[in-house]
Image: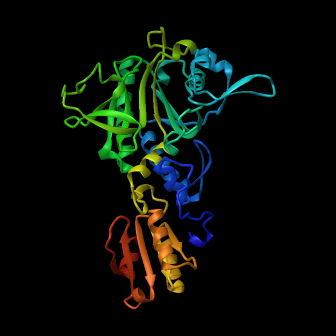
Amino acid sequence: MKQSFLFTKTLKDAPKDETSLNAQTLIRAGFIDKVGAGIYTFLPLGLRVMDKILKVIREEVNSTGAQEVLMPALLPREVWETTGRWENFDALFKLTGSDSREYALGATHEEIVTPLAKKYIFSYRELPLSIYQIQTKFRNEKRAKAGLIRGREFLMKDQYSFHVSQEDLDEYYEKVKAAYYRIYERLGLGEITYLTYASGGAFSKYSHEFQTVTAAGEDHIYVCDHCKVAINREIIDEQNACPVCGNTELREDKAIEVGNIFKLGTRFSTPCNLKFTTAEGNSEEVVMGCYGIGPSRLLGTIVEIFHDEKGLKWPKEIAPFQVHLLSLKSDEEAEKLYNRLVDAGVEVLFDDRDVSAGEKFADADLLGIPERIVVSAKTLAEDSVELKLRGQEAAEKIKIEAYVQRFI
């Protein structure tokens, strides 16, 4: 893509109505635009990053055997009353339609997915089964002050599994847990993301969160460095030792919750009368699990971690482009190199704008693309480009042909 055609522009100053670094930086760099508190538009650069995050999530979730669906976001009151959550789910956005019926905007989808599964699950032969969606969720969040980390409208990957027994659920639960570890590793968060024990498990002592350590975190966790797991603040008084090894020397840290998984048991099967016929001909309730990841929250978390005073520093797998090509008064030669790289399948942002070199360098740092190459009269005299990796101070010269061959 040529930067002169890019829909958005960078801003010199951070927006004054934002307090979170992730929103300030993403708005300055032209990745998102603020519509209201906790409500953002994803602009072309931001959407490219989001699409790559979703690609990672889909690949790893699909590897567990889950199938993707898309459920509605407008949900009738009646489905919430089935489970008693119309009155006690405080974060629901509620509205009345022209038909005088009451609705809520989807905050979670257990009340929809369970009756859906009931239409297709009859016998043990249909189980186990897992389906998921990636969809916009709505929650009437009172503390929408953390940019993409705590929004009123946000993306969510919510996944649900259905089983013949607790043992079958336990086995699949471990598969999803492993897939989550792979997701965070691919997104550059593997070393600082901990499986965190939390209260609230329906059929086990714990539920689990995945918490990424950062000073911008809203949660407090207690890390066992021996086992690389943690406990969240809500259960530390009753469980002041590592649940894996018993270590009592736990390290307190701030973190952002980037995922959670629950063993639901029959919490939703019972009110929805979701049953299956066993091999012996008996009728039993389906055992369920659920597994959530917020892709937009993940994006905000990544920004909080991968940045410096100059701007963004995207991990390679999710960067909007692989290469940022800057032309300094050598547009014709830069265009030739741009075309060669594009033909080789390289994702290139070509800064062909008629602005100063200083502005181009500053914007390159702000946008945070992993590799920056500069074409100028000076480099062309040596048949070279200047290559600089984002986050490194020193640049190096590399022959143009050698650089192109890296991608062929």
Quadrant hosting residue 376: bottom left
Q: Which residue is situated farthest in the top direction here? A: 282
Residue 111's place in the image compared with 5, above or below, is above
- Left or right of residue 399, residue 83 in this image: right
- Measuring from the top left, give residue 78's x and y in whole percent: 67, 18
- Please name the residue shown 57% across and 41% down the image: 38
- Please name the residue shown 45% across and 59% down the image: 319
- Please name the residue shown 51% across and 32% down the image: 131
Quadrant hosting residue 308: bottom left
- Left or right of residue 306, residue 351 in this image: right
- Left or right of residue 330, residue 182 in this image: left
Residue 153's place in the image compared with 232, above or below, is below
- Measuring from the top left, give residue 271's x and y in whole percent: 56, 13
- Left or right of residue 272, residue 65 in this image: left
Q: Number of numbered discs present?
A: 0
Query: Which colour style is shown?
Result: rainbow
- Please name the residue shown 32% across and 46% down the image: 190
- Measuring from the top left, give residue 248's x and y in whole percent: 19, 27
